[in-house]
Image (cartoon, helix red, strand yellow):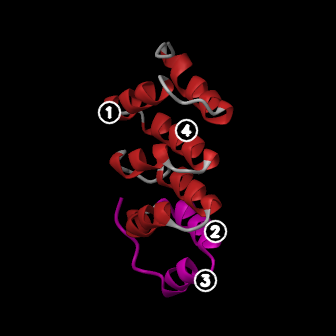
Amino acid sequence: MRGLAPLPELDEAFERDPHVALTVASALADATYRARMEALLDHDHGSVRAQAARALALMPDVCASALLGALTDSSTWVRAAAVHSLGRIGTPDALAALQRLALHEQNSVVRTALVDVLHPRGLWR
Protein backbone atom coordinates (compact mmCIF):
# COMPACT_ATOMS: atom_id res chain seq x y z
CA MET A 1 0.00 0.00 0.00
CA ARG A 2 1.24 3.46 -0.88
CA GLY A 3 1.75 5.77 2.05
CA LEU A 4 -0.57 8.72 2.46
CA ALA A 5 0.70 12.23 2.28
CA PRO A 6 1.14 13.37 5.89
CA LEU A 7 -2.03 14.86 7.34
CA PRO A 8 -1.13 17.86 9.55
CA GLU A 9 -4.41 17.59 11.46
CA LEU A 10 -3.70 13.96 12.34
CA ASP A 11 -0.13 14.79 13.34
CA GLU A 12 -1.50 17.42 15.73
CA ALA A 13 -4.09 14.96 17.06
CA PHE A 14 -1.34 12.53 18.09
CA GLU A 15 -0.14 15.27 20.44
CA ARG A 16 -3.56 16.48 21.68
CA ASP A 17 -5.60 13.27 21.87
CA PRO A 18 -3.78 10.02 21.12
CA HIS A 19 -7.03 8.00 21.34
CA VAL A 20 -8.64 9.91 18.48
CA ALA A 21 -5.46 9.88 16.43
CA LEU A 22 -5.05 6.12 16.87
CA THR A 23 -8.64 5.53 15.82
CA VAL A 24 -8.24 7.60 12.67
CA ALA A 25 -4.80 6.24 11.80
CA SER A 26 -5.87 2.62 12.24
CA ALA A 27 -8.99 3.25 10.14
CA LEU A 28 -6.70 4.54 7.42
CA ALA A 29 -4.57 1.40 7.87
CA ASP A 30 -1.66 3.19 6.33
CA ALA A 31 2.02 2.73 7.12
CA THR A 32 2.53 6.51 7.14
CA TYR A 33 1.53 6.56 10.82
CA ARG A 34 3.02 3.24 11.89
CA ALA A 35 6.02 4.82 13.63
CA ARG A 36 3.70 7.13 15.58
CA MET A 37 1.61 4.14 16.66
CA GLU A 38 4.70 2.20 17.69
CA ALA A 39 5.87 5.20 19.73
CA LEU A 40 2.52 5.22 21.56
CA LEU A 41 3.31 1.75 22.93
CA ASP A 42 5.41 3.74 25.45
CA HIS A 43 2.68 6.30 26.31
CA ASP A 44 2.03 7.12 29.98
CA HIS A 45 -1.57 5.89 29.85
CA GLY A 46 -2.24 2.16 29.59
CA SER A 47 -5.40 2.71 27.56
CA VAL A 48 -3.38 4.49 24.86
CA ARG A 49 -0.77 1.70 24.88
CA ALA A 50 -3.51 -0.94 24.56
CA GLN A 51 -5.19 0.90 21.69
CA ALA A 52 -1.83 1.27 19.93
CA ALA A 53 -1.23 -2.49 20.27
CA ARG A 54 -4.64 -3.23 18.74
CA ALA A 55 -4.18 -0.67 15.96
CA LEU A 56 -0.78 -2.01 14.93
CA ALA A 57 -2.29 -5.40 14.10
CA LEU A 58 -4.46 -3.68 11.49
CA MET A 59 -1.51 -2.14 9.69
CA PRO A 60 -0.29 -3.82 6.52
CA ASP A 61 3.05 -5.54 6.92
CA VAL A 62 3.31 -4.71 10.61
CA CYS A 63 6.37 -6.13 12.25
CA ALA A 64 5.59 -8.31 15.28
CA SER A 65 8.75 -7.08 17.01
CA ALA A 66 7.04 -3.75 17.72
CA LEU A 67 4.48 -5.60 19.83
CA LEU A 68 6.72 -8.11 21.62
CA GLY A 69 7.71 -5.59 24.28
CA ALA A 70 4.05 -4.97 25.06
CA LEU A 71 3.81 -8.55 26.36
CA THR A 72 5.66 -7.40 29.48
CA ASP A 73 3.72 -4.16 29.98
CA SER A 74 2.53 -3.42 33.51
CA SER A 75 -1.05 -3.06 32.26
CA THR A 76 -3.17 -6.20 31.94
CA TRP A 77 -5.10 -4.64 29.08
CA VAL A 78 -1.96 -3.77 27.12
CA ARG A 79 -0.68 -7.34 27.48
CA ALA A 80 -4.05 -8.77 26.40
CA ALA A 81 -4.22 -6.42 23.40
CA ALA A 82 -0.68 -7.40 22.42
CA VAL A 83 -1.62 -11.09 22.65
CA HIS A 84 -4.58 -10.61 20.31
CA SER A 85 -2.55 -8.45 17.92
CA LEU A 86 0.33 -10.91 17.77
CA GLY A 87 -2.18 -13.69 17.18
CA ARG A 88 -3.68 -11.72 14.32
CA ILE A 89 -0.23 -11.21 12.82
CA GLY A 90 0.38 -14.93 13.31
CA THR A 91 4.04 -15.22 12.35
CA PRO A 92 5.97 -18.17 13.80
CA ASP A 93 8.00 -15.79 16.01
CA ALA A 94 4.85 -14.10 17.31
CA LEU A 95 3.17 -17.40 18.13
CA ALA A 96 6.32 -18.74 19.80
CA ALA A 97 6.43 -15.64 22.02
CA LEU A 98 2.81 -16.23 23.00
CA GLN A 99 3.54 -19.86 23.86
CA ARG A 100 6.43 -18.75 26.08
CA LEU A 101 4.17 -16.20 27.79
CA ALA A 102 1.55 -18.90 28.41
CA LEU A 103 4.06 -20.83 30.53
CA HIS A 104 4.18 -18.17 33.26
CA GLU A 105 1.37 -15.61 32.82
CA GLN A 106 -0.87 -15.60 35.90
CA ASN A 107 -3.36 -12.87 35.04
CA SER A 108 -6.74 -14.33 34.06
CA VAL A 109 -7.48 -11.66 31.43
CA VAL A 110 -4.18 -12.25 29.66
CA ARG A 111 -4.51 -16.03 30.01
CA THR A 112 -7.96 -15.86 28.42
CA ALA A 113 -6.49 -13.89 25.52
CA LEU A 114 -3.76 -16.52 25.18
CA VAL A 115 -6.32 -19.34 25.09
CA ASP A 116 -8.37 -17.40 22.49
CA VAL A 117 -5.32 -17.11 20.25
CA LEU A 118 -3.44 -20.37 20.84
CA HIS A 119 -6.15 -22.97 21.36
CA PRO A 120 -7.74 -22.74 17.86
CA ARG A 121 -4.26 -23.28 16.41
CA GLY A 122 -3.63 -26.34 18.57
CA LEU A 123 -0.86 -24.51 20.42
CA TRP A 124 -2.38 -24.28 23.89
CA ARG A 125 -0.57 -26.52 26.35
- Mark 1, residues whose alpha carbon is within 10 Å: few (<14), some, or many (≥20)? some
Q: What's the residue type where badge 3 is placed?
A: Arg
The answer to the question of whether label 2 and label 1 lie on touching residues, with beta carbons closer than 8 A, is no
Query: How far apart are labels 2 and 1 at the CA level?
Result: 29 Å
Give the labeled residue for mark 4. Answer: 84
> In the depicted view, which residue is nearer to us: 10 or 98?
98
Q: Give the residue at mark 1.
A: 93
Coordinates of residue 100 in the picture (x, y in percent): 41, 27
Q: Amino acid at mark 1?
A: Asp
Assess whether mark 2 and mark 3 are in contact (beta carbons under 8 angstroms): no
Badge 2 local density, few (<14 within 10 Å), some, or many (20+)?
A: some
Residue drawn where x is 39% and y is 32% of the image = 97
Residue at label 2? 19
In x, y percent, where is residue 31? 39, 63
Alpha carbon distance from label 1 to label 4: 14 Å
- For mark 1, give the secondary structure: helix
Residues packed near mark 3 inside 10 Å, few (<14), some (14 to 19) or many (20 plus): few
Q: Amino acid at mark 2?
A: His
Determine which residue is flagged by label 3: 16
In this image, 39 relative to 9: left or right?
Answer: left
User: Which circle's residue, 4 or 3, is located before the other in the chain?
Assistant: 3
Name the residue at 62% across, 45% down. Answer: 76
Q: Residue at x 56, y 68 (%)?
A: 44
Looking at the picture, how far across and down is residue 47, in whole percent?
64, 59
What SS does tag 3 mark? helix
The amino acid pointed to by label 4 is His
Q: Secondary structure at mark 2?
A: helix
Other-residue count near label 4 (Cα within 10 Å), few / some / many at <14 / 14–19 / ≥20: many
Q: Which residues are magenta?
A: 1-29
Q: Earlier in the sequence, mark 1 or mark 4?
A: 4
